[in-house]
Amino acid sequence: MKTSKEKILSFLQSKIKESKESTQTNFNNVVRLMHQPYLNEGIGKGSIFETESSLFVVGVKLPALKYEGKNIIGLTTDSPFYRFFKNKKDGDEVKFGNDIEHIKII
């Protein structure tokens, strides 16, 4: 049986193949993430995590996608948005204006 991470990455692989916006590099990065273990050291390259509003994949650019009703956002480690999540752990909170989001690492 596939884990949640494997299900998400399989979904991404199929959608990236279909997308006109995607490149072979994006596809290869998703494949590489599938084989990279999570070391429980906080969010970093290769992490997949979700908040109440979105699902994030660190280390790859992605086209606009939805998975189980949530937007999937690809974050590169040089993205300004990434700094909100870098090194956060499962259960940590992130504040955006008046909204507080809880992190669940997959």
Image (spheres, rainbow, N blue to C red):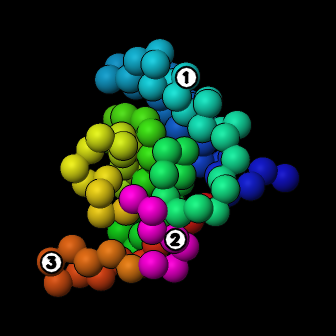
Q: Main secondary structure of the magenta part?
A: loop
**Residue 104, numbered label:** none
Q: Residues within 10 Å of mark 3 (few under 14, many from 20)?
A: few
Picture quadrant where residue 40 is located: bottom right
**Residue 70 against residue 6 in the figure, above or below:** below
Q: CA distance from mark 3 to mark 2?
A: 20 Å
Q: CA distance from mark 1 to mark 3?
A: 35 Å
Picture quadrant where residue 98 is located: bottom left
Q: Which comes before the other along the chain, label 3 or label 2?
A: 2
Q: Secondary structure at mark 1?
A: helix
Q: Amino acid at mark 2?
A: Lys
**Residue 97, numbered label:** 3
Q: Secondary structure at mark 2?
A: loop
Residue 85 drawn at (x, y percent): 37, 62
Q: Which residues are magenta?
A: 86-92
Residue picked out by circle 1: 28
For marks 2 and 1, give the one nearer the viewer.
2
Q: Which comes before the other along the chain, label 2 or label 1?
A: 1
Q: Residue furthest left?
A: 97
Q: Amino acid at mark 1?
A: Asn
At 32% from the left and 23% from the top, the residue drawn is 21
For marks 3 and 2, give the one nearer the viewer.
2
**Residue 89, numbered label:** 2
Picture quadrant where residue 55 is located: bottom left
Left-right relation of 91 to 21: right
Q: Amino acid at mark 3?
A: Gly
